[in-house]
Each structure stands twice: as C-alpha cells, then as structure tokens.
Amino acid sequence: MPVYSRWVAVERKAGAQGLALFLAAAVSICLLAAAGSGCNSSASRPDDLAGGLEQRLRADIAFLADDQLEGRGTPSRGLDLAALYLASQLQASGAPAAISGSYLQRYSLGEYTPAEADVTVRVNGKLIAPSDYVFWNVAYDPGRGPISLPLVYAGDGIVAEDKNVDDLSALDLAGKAVVAKRGAPWPLNPDDVFGPDRAMGKLIGATVRGAGMLVYLSDELDQGDEAEAHFFHEMKAAGVCFLREPKVTHASGLNPVLVIRPAVFAQAMNKDIVQIEAGPLGAGIEVNIQAKVREGAASNVLAKIEGSDPALRAEWVVLSAHYDHIGAHDVAAGEDGIWNGADDNASGTAAVLELARRLARNPGKRSVLILLTSGEDRGILGSAFYAAEPLIPMDRVAAQINLDMIGRSEGSVQAIADGSTVLYDQTVRLGGSHGIEVIPDQQPTWRLVYLTDAYHFARANVPYVFFFTGTHPDYHQPSDTADKVRY
C-alpha cells in the first residue's frame, strides 16, 4: 500500500496460523472459476502447499524482495529488473503478452525532493510565512504551474455516515480548495490519522467531491503530540512523484494539503475565524512550487488470458497486484537501508503469478487480464496510467480482483469491496465452502480503496474486491523480509 498509509494503526489478531499467503490466492481462483465451471478443488487443498506450489511462491518472493532489487522503488533499476522477471515468468506460464507482443506498459513520470524545492503560499493575495504552514504535495506536477483555487469554507469538513454528519453536502467543491478546521463535535482519537474527523478523512471527502486541495486549519501543524502531526512531519519531507503523461492530470485519490495556523488564515482573510461561515469565501489560494524535477519511467506488466466461453470471453476480470515498494534510503552506518517489501507487495505479486500459471493452463469462461502495477507506493501511479490507457475498456470489465499484502495472515483474509456487495457475498460463500475465513474490512474508516490500485477501477464503476491480511510491525520497514511471509 502507498507510503502515506504507513501511519495506520497496527492491530494483530490472535488465531490459527494455517494457510496464509495461499488464502487470498485460493479465494481469488475460486472467485474467477465461479464465473466458469466451478472452483477447482485442487486450488485450495492443504496438500497442494507441499512441493511445487510453495517452492514457486518462495522463489518469486525471494527474488522480488532480495537486496539486489533495492526495494523496487519507482523509478529505479531494481524496479526495472523486477518487471523483466515478472514478464519472463508470465511468458514461461504460457500467458500471452498483452501489448503487441510485449508484457510491458511503459509510462513517464517526474519526481522532486521537497527540501530542494522553493514553495510560496498566498492566501487572499497575502504571502504566508513558511513557519505558519506545512505543505504536503500529493502527486501534483509543478510543471503545470501554480496551484490557484478559490476557497470554500466547510467548517469541520466531516463526512461520517455512521454519525449522520455531512458538512460538504450543500457545498459546490469542484475545482475549489476546501477549508476545514481541525476538530469534530466529539473527542478526537489522538492515535488516529485516517478517520473521517481527521485531516486525511476530510481530504478524501473533499477530493471525492471534486476539490483540488484541502486547507486544514490547525495550530499543531506538524509539531504536535498526536499521530496526525507526526504524519505531516514525515509527509512534508517525502519525495513527490507524479505522472508526466498528457492523458493523466492527477493520479492519486488524494490532493495536496496545506496545514495552516487558524489565526494566520483569519488574518489573511481579514476576519475572525468564528465569523467565517460555510460557503465560498470570495478569495483564493495560490501555491507556487519551484522544483528541480528528475525525469524517469516505469512499467506495468500485463498479460491476457482469453476465456473459454464464446459468449462470455468478451467480458473480462482484471487480476491485479502492485510489484513496487518504497526503495532504498540513506541510513546511518550499520543500519539496513533497503525496504524489501516482501509482504508489501511481493506477496500479492507472487500470488497473481501463480494464478496466471493456473489460468493459462485452465482458463475460465471469462477472459482475464493480469495487471501488475508499479508506482502504487508513490501514489497509485501505475494504475492511474493504466486507467487512462486501458487495454480493456472499463465497461467490459466485469470485476477487478486486487491482491495487496496477503502474506501475513493469522487465519483469515479481509475482502474489501465497498459498493460491491454481491461480489463480497459471493467471496464469503466461496471461501467458506473451501475452509477459508473471509472477513469484512477491519478498518472501514481508513477508506483503503482511495489508497490502493482498486481506486481507479472503483471510480470507473467497476465492481472490485481487494484482498488484504492486515498490517503488522514490519509494514513499510526494512524488516518486511521474505523469511517472515507465512507461505
């Protein structure tokens, strides 16, 4: 999952540590086969873990998570080596290349380091001192010019259906910068970053409604004691990566965030903060980013497996996983500077490869597109490019099955399928019939779909299910290594 999701709370559940990596893969192949001739019982037999299957899973993850691939950052030499390995494995499986004889879908991107950039912020035409704000750029290409948007005030800016709260419903947010103050009508959880009453939740709510930025009024900035402030402290320094493709204006399910002191914002608006009412503010914000952009490129890896049914083969299932991770970093002497990403997401990638091997030998009735994406941990870039240049029109995709972090199960697998109730119910039923416990999203307030490759299919109204076995202390750490995967 993306680097900006590393601050999610880590929860561990007790339970059997039986079939782990194979759980999500087995449910996936059952789900795929359910559209065909039924689930092949050999897909989920415990004795299938012995011998060749486990050896293949171990070999795939060992290669992808090896130090020689330097954490598979986007873009990087290690990522390109991983792409070539995946293409060779798909070719060996017999799954045909998807793009005119090639398995690689190449795209261009740019990146810069915030510490080397010059950022100026003006609210209502007034220059804001750097000590009074924190700016976090999410996937915005400074080559597009300044971010210049009219301001709309949304009060708390909360959308929480379970509490019957929607501060955005009466506001036109398309193409606007939404101003929301820190806080809620209830006590905040100091350890929460992704709840609807926190900046990330308010950003998601605004982005979904067409807003181009969140202006977050908080005295904490990035120096407070709460997890949210720690999150912004890290994110403001994180490298910024973005697509440089004409068909994609913004890749992420999120937009840039400006955290600013409430008193400074009120002074720029010539109003007391308590006098500001919900609605357009009659003023704008401008953020100008001058940065030295490094050009790069990365690849998605794709194969097509045609279905066996003459009528249904025109319908497609997209089977996806991201194969990138967050790369290598400068660390003190003697420390591990390579983030190997065995669970995130060599595990999902290895499972998709195994499914491709099986489907190439025994196709279902519907056709299957194997989609292994890069750039997910830099802001779902690869899937954004695919969605802009789809090999299969989205209206011909019956479902997307996404595998992300499935290597550390403690006895169950989460099936996250917001808005795809029928698909979720079918998954639970198929899992149960093969002894696999499928459970619902265990962190619904995080709204993970906006942080994963499923986002670009969900926004195209494609039903999806995203398999996930949860976070752990090794998540987005150098300690996420191949020896800890529960094969």
Image: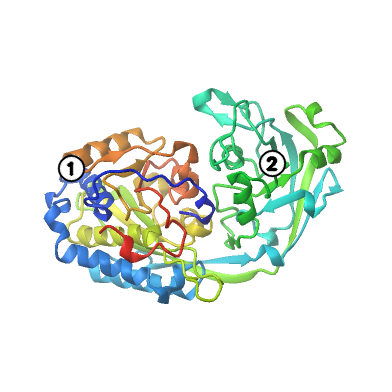
- State how many labels appear: 2
Side of 43 where 66 appears, left or right: right
The part of the image, by quadrant, that contains residue 343 is bottom left
At x 63%, y 71%, the residue is 294
Element under disc 1: loop
Name the kind of residue labelled 1 in the image: Gly
Side of 62 where 155 appears, left or right: right
Instruction: Give the number of the disc on residue 216.
Output: 2
* Neighbour tally class for label 1: few under 14, some 14-19, many 20 plus, Cα within 10 Å: few
Q: Are marks 2 and 1 in contact (CB under 8 Å)?
A: no
**Horizontal and vertical percent for residue 264?**
82, 42
**Residue 288 shows up from this direction:** yes
Which of the two labelled residues, at mark 2 and mark 1, occupies the earlier sequence position? 2
At x 32%, y 66%, the residue is 61
Q: Is residue 421 above or below residue 322?
A: above
Q: Is residue 337 above or below residue 415?
A: below
Q: Nearer the viewer, residue 307 or 14?
A: 14
* Quarter of the image where the C terminus is located: bottom left
Element under disc 2: strand
At x 67%, y 32%, the residue is 172
Give me the C-alpha separation between circle 2 and circle 1.
Answer: 47 Å
The part of the image, by quadrant, that contains residue 31 is top left
**Horizontal and vertical percent for residue 346?**
36, 62
Q: Is residue 64 above or below residue 470?
A: below
**Horizontal and vertical percent for residue 429?**
22, 36
Disc 1 designates what residue?
435
